[in-house]
Each structure stands twice: as C-alpha cells, then as structure tokens.
Amino acid sequence: MPSSRLLILAGAVVVSLLLSAAPAARAEGEGYGYIPGTPEGPENWGNLKPEWATCSTGKRQSPINLALLDLTLAPGLGYLNYTYQNANASVVNRGDDISVRFDGDAGSLLINGTAYQLRQMHWHTPSEHTIDGKRFDMELHMVHLNAQNEAAVIGILYKIGILRDEFLYKLEPYIRRIIDQKNKEVLVDNGVDPNVAKGKDTVYYRYMGSFTTPPCTEGVIWTVVKKVRSVTPTQVALLKAAVLAGYENNARPLQAVNKREIDMFIPLPLIN
C-alpha cells in the first residue's frame, strides 16, 4: 500500500478515536448528564453536589405525566394573562441546550396578581412532560421570574410533522452559527417575538413543580399548553446537532406526582 494511503488511513483512525472519546470528555465538563447508568446520569444528580440534593430528595419535582384521571377541572384559573412583545435577544449554546436569552423587556405573565417577567426560552428533545404516558418529540420552556426571583414556566409540546415551527425557523440561522460551541452566543437581528412561540391556544395544565435541571429548585409554577404543535424532523435534528455530544436527548425522566394537584383550564361555553 502506498505510504500516502497509509498516512490517510492512520489519520482517519486517529480522528475516529478522538471522536469516539469526545462525548464522554465533554459530558463530564457539564457537571451532569442525561445518560442513565452513568455517574452523571439523572438518577445521580442529587448526589453530585450538596446544593443539588433536592434533585433526589424533593417531593415536587418536574417533569411529570399529565394523566387525564389525575386532573381537576379548574375554570377559575382563567385564560393565561400575558403581554409579550418583540425584544432584543441572543441565541446561546449552553452546552446541554440551546436557549434564547432576552436582553430587553420581552413582556410578562400575570399569575394571581403577580407579574413574572419572561427571561429566557430553551428547548428539550424529546419532550420532558408527557400526556397520558405519551412523550413528544420536543418541548419549549418559556422561563419567567418575578421580583422575588420565583419562577413560572410555560411548556409547549411538539410532535414531528410536515409543518415547521415558525418560531424556531426564524432562529435556525443563528443556531447554526453556534453548533457544538459551548457558551457561544449570537445577537438576533431585529429581536425575538415571544408571541410567535406562545400562540393563542387556551387550554392548559397547571401544577407546582421544579426546574428540570440541577439544582432542581422547587416552587416553580408550571403551565403546560395542551395543544401539541408541529415541528419538522430537520428542526429537531438541528437542535440535537447544536448541543454538545451526550446532550442530544436532554429530557429528564418523569418524576413522581406524590399526590400533587394537577389542574386543567378549559374555557366554559358562554351562556346567553
């Protein structure tokens, strides 16, 4: 075999070995992972750091299965009261997910008279919450904080279909620029409008839970929109390609409900 071909073959073997070793090395750098049975896997999050203990000991953890038989109809919750607006934002590769961080006033969500300001949005593939045991292909989290730094999150579920998600579609060029680059961020031209992501769907689930990543802080007000939206296979593939290796499937396993109340808001028919 010519020496040039031997060099090429040897180089290919070296590259292959480096690539095969890369996922584990980079996963360790995140501090936690999603692969069950590994030292950083979800079942071990609570043991990795003292400040993450709630991930194991908490009784109101997220995500959960939203089961029809466990629901309480709650018309008193009312329509979601939110006022979103276009704002300056950056797309950020956080390693374990891709997020949109708002640098301006993107608006707020009002719950029980308290305003929760929209701070960031990020994606999980596949979905973290399930409905009657069914898991979906993607979930978007809209993370809000009030003046006391308490959180309220809106979760939007997606299944793969022929229709693209317009919110994600606008951000695709920016996501491509930060593929596999942890802590890399790019400013979005002309800002980001959260209304495109939220849509006008009215039926939703509501329960008290936690953040789904360490430190798994509890006291989070969860609102999961019932209507499942469409996303294309290439859009999901882009999100998976953009994060660091080992985080392509960045959904935390389901957590115990522990007798929590799960409410569901359905608008009542108007009576003339």
Image (cartoon, rainbow, N blue to C red):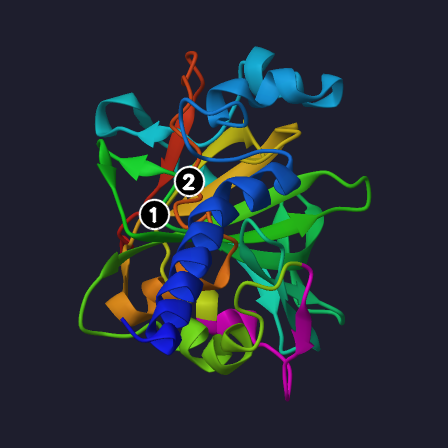
List x then y, in percent, for residue 190.
Answer: 64, 88
In the image, 82 versus 11, the foreground residue is 11
Give the residue type at disc 1.
Pro
Residue 193 magenta? yes
List x then y, in percent, for residue 104.
Answer: 76, 72
In the image, 67 versus 256, the foreground residue is 256
- Mark 2 and mark 1 in contact (Cβ < 8 Å)? yes
Magenta segment boundaries in residue numbering:
183-196
List x then y, in percent, for residue 94.
Answer: 63, 55
The answer to which image quadrant residue 241 occupies is bottom left
How far apart marks 1 and 2 lie (CA) works out to 6 Å
User: In the picture provided, is 38 more to the left or to the right than 152?
Assistant: left
Quadrant, the N terminus? bottom left
Give the residue type at disc 2.
Ala
User: In the picture provided, is 272 more to the left or to the right than 45?
Assistant: left
Compared with 9, 225 (above or below) is: above
Q: Residue furthest bottom?
A: 190
The residue identified by callout 2 is: 251
Secondary structure category for the residue under label 1: loop
Q: Please give the name of the residue rendered at 64% of the width and 35% of the height, measured from the top-left corner.
A: 31
Q: Is there any visible trace of residue 146 in the rendered image?
A: yes
